[in-house]
Image (tube, rainbow, N blue to C red):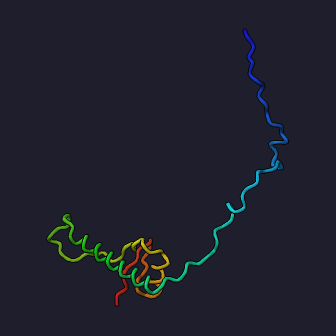
Amino acid sequence: MSESTDPPIETPSPEALSPEAPQPAVDAAANASPPATSSPKPSPEELKAAMKAFKKRIKMTQLDSDSSFTKSPLSGGKTQILGITPPNQYPKAVWDALAAEGKLKYVGQGMYELRSP
């Protein structure tokens, strides 16, 4: 038989595997938490536009539900849709501000409904 000419495999010493071995430097910015900045309060114009978009979305959702072909014509009645997920064009802070003003009601799981006047 012929001998192999492969180089010998080096095994690391026990000192190299110890927990006291120097660790590679980690970028401090990667471990830093995001800055704790509060979102700016939405402007009155933005709140008004968001409310208009919400009303339009809920109206369209109700009309879509009422015009369904799968509904029995004998059942009659209007839709039971009251709460919707608000349009995503506006941040959550806008919807929370409208709920705090009493114009919307948070009903859970990211859904809001109109407050009755």
Q: Is residue 112 above or below residue 16?
A: below
Residue 4 position by quadrant: top right
| Rendered location of residue 10, percent (x, y) | 79, 31
| Rendered location of residue 107, percent (x, y) | 42, 77
Which quadrant, please, contains the C terminus?
bottom left
106 displayed left or right of 76: right
85 displayed left or right of 71: right
78 displayed left or right of 14: left
* Residue shown at 75% from the left, 13% from the top: 3
* Residue shown at 74% from the left, 21% from the top: 6
User: Which one is nearer the viewer's eye here, 115 or 23?
Assistant: 23
Q: Residue furthest left?
A: 74
Residue 108 position by quadrant: bottom left
100 displayed left or right of 69: right
| Rendered location of residue 39, percent (x, y) | 55, 78
Q: Residue furthest top?
A: 1
* Residue shown at 20% from the left, 67% from the top: 71
